Every structure is written in structure tokens, then in C-alpha cells.
Amino acid sequence: MDGALTSRHLGLDLGGTFIKWVVIESTPQGTRTVATGKAATNANGGPGRVVDQLAELGRAAAAEVGTVATVGVGVPGLHDPATGRTRFLPNIPGDWAGVPVVDPVKAAVGVPTVLINDARAFALAELRLGAGRGARSLLGITLGTGVGGGVVIDGGLHFGHDGTAGEIGHQTILPDGPLCGCGNYGCLEALCRASAISAACGCASVEEAVARARAGDDRARAGLEQIGRYLGLGISNAVVLITPDVVVIGGGAAGAGDLLLDPIRVELRKRIHVTNVDQVRLVLTELGPWAGAIGAAIHGAGSVQNISV
Ligand SMILES: [Zn+2]
């Protein structure tokens, strides 16, 4: 490394299918990604095995680049920022209540370590290095197994009192809609999660739904339009609350592009009357599948070393 003003930071992104990692390098000239990797998540081994895998991947990733100053770990669910333990990870098998993550990863890598929700990490990454660069306020939405969210206000993530602020997927859209994994009925997530998109489009997967819609399949196109309408309702509710400069959509279904953005735009125009909707940019992720790991790395740098990436 080239002196005290250059530092490297590791981000780990725990997903149900893969654990991804990135190392970012922060210099006075800017920030860049210097290494990436991923491994299939050992999800059926139970939480203990998954945490062992995170720790080992973290140790190996740090060794690959020499050393890192901090680690941030993105988790797909809720955690306790004070103890560094998970609370609820709905899409990875096992009981994740109270599972220590910070301590084992910190012990393996040997540097300060923090947790962040993966969708909050996505929003942070797009704000600093992606589609939201230059924005002061931002709403990030991840369309994956679930529907995640993160809110940036005045240039920084808004965490709320326990790190759960930004859960756009768990606002009620249909009062008597389908049961959500959170226990409520008719949540945006229950209507727009990957399995709901596949079902609405009559397809086996989101990828198939997007491919068929692009090829002109009527049912797939109508399904994506319905999903876009629900998303537009949820985003409208958020926009009138926070009037973000930019709304960034990520996750697998972002590959649908305008097939999803167009019906969202229609709904925003229909629902929003208190602010000028033309001043809210609606865009797709720039960082793609690495956004979560990059955001976790940025969060680690900022919260542990007070380095603004
Ligand atoms: Zn919910």
C-alpha cells in the first residue's frame, strides 16, 4: 500500500446461493475494486457452518490482497448492530436468532468487523460508486428472493434505531393480500418476490420470465406489468415520504429493464401529486451483482475507521 491515505476494505455478501466478496481500495484519487470472488453457500450445513465459511472466505480474501483494514458483512435479513449477531434470515435454512457473525469473522481476519443488511449495503454502494453518485437522498430496492430496501437521507444511510429502516418490501400494498414471510398480509415483498414474479408470468424463474417477455410472450409481459404496478405503488408511497433524488432498482428482476420500469413510471405519475415526479430519477443498478459486497465494504470502512469511500 502507498501510505496512510490508501486503505483496503473487505466486503462479504451472504446470499442464499452464493457468498460474494470484494476488496475495495480507497485512495485520495477515489475508490476502486481490486479483487472479487465467490463461493457456493454451504446453506444446508446450518448457521454454524455458514459462519465458518464466511470467516474462512474472509481470511483467504484478505490474504489474497495482503491485508485489509476493515470487514463489512452484508446479511439477507435482520441483525443486532450492538452484538454483531443475526436475528432473522428468512431465506437461509436454520435458526438464525442470536447467531454470532462479527466475532468469528473478526477473529479469522484479525481486523474490526461490522454487519449491515444486504439491501442497505446495495443502496450505499449505488450512492457512493454506482447509479446514485452525487445524490443527497436515494431509495434503493433489491428484487430477489425477497424485496429489500435502503433509504439514504442527507448523503448517508438512514438506519433507524435498530438498523431496520428502509424495509420497503414490508409495507402493505393489498390489505387482504397473500401472507408474507414477515407475518403480515399483502406486503410488497409477498407480491413481488422472485417466486411471485415467476408465478405472475407463468414461468419457472425470473430469468425465464424476463427472457419470454423480451421475446414478446403476452403472459410474461402482462405478469411483469402487474409486478411493475405493485412496485410503482410501493415506490410512490416512499417517494411522497422522502422525495429522493434517485430511486435505484437492483436484483435479478432488474434485468427486465423498461418492461418493469415503464409500468412503475405509469404508477408514479398516477399516484404522486404532492411533488414533481420528474425530479425523481428512476434508474437501474450500475454495480449489478457485486453491489451488496461493495456496500458492505464501504460500510465497514465508514463505521470502523471513519473513512468516507
Ligand atoms: Zn412482509
Image (tube, helix red, strand yellow):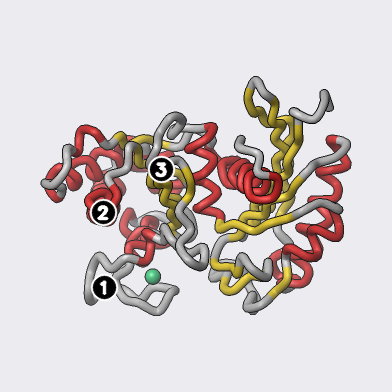
Q: Residues within 10 Å of mark 3 (few under 14, many from 20)?
A: few
Residue found 52% across the figure and 44% down from its top: 124
Residue of label 3? 154
Residue found 11% across the figure and 46% down from its top: 273
In contact (CB < 8 Å): disc 3 and disc 2: no
Pinpoint residue 37: horizontal percent, then vertical percent: 73, 41
Q: Which mark is residue 241?
A: 2
Residue 125, relative to residue 53: is it above or below? above
Quarter, ligand 1: bottom left
Tell me the kind of residue under disc 2. Answer: Leu
Q: Which mark's residue is nearer the viewer, 3 or 2?
A: 3
The Cα atoms of the two marked residues, 3 and 2, are separated by: 14 Å
- Give the mark nearest the N terminus, 1 or 3: 3
Tell me the kind of residue under disc 1. Answer: Gly
Is residue 293 something one can see in this rendering?
no
Q: Assign a secondary structure to mark 2.
A: helix
Residue found 73% across the figure and 55% down from its top: 113
Q: Residue furthest top?
A: 29
Q: Assign a secondary structure to mark 3.
A: loop
Q: Is residue 295 left or right of residue 61?
A: left
Asked where in the image residue 158 lies, by quadrant, the reply is: bottom left
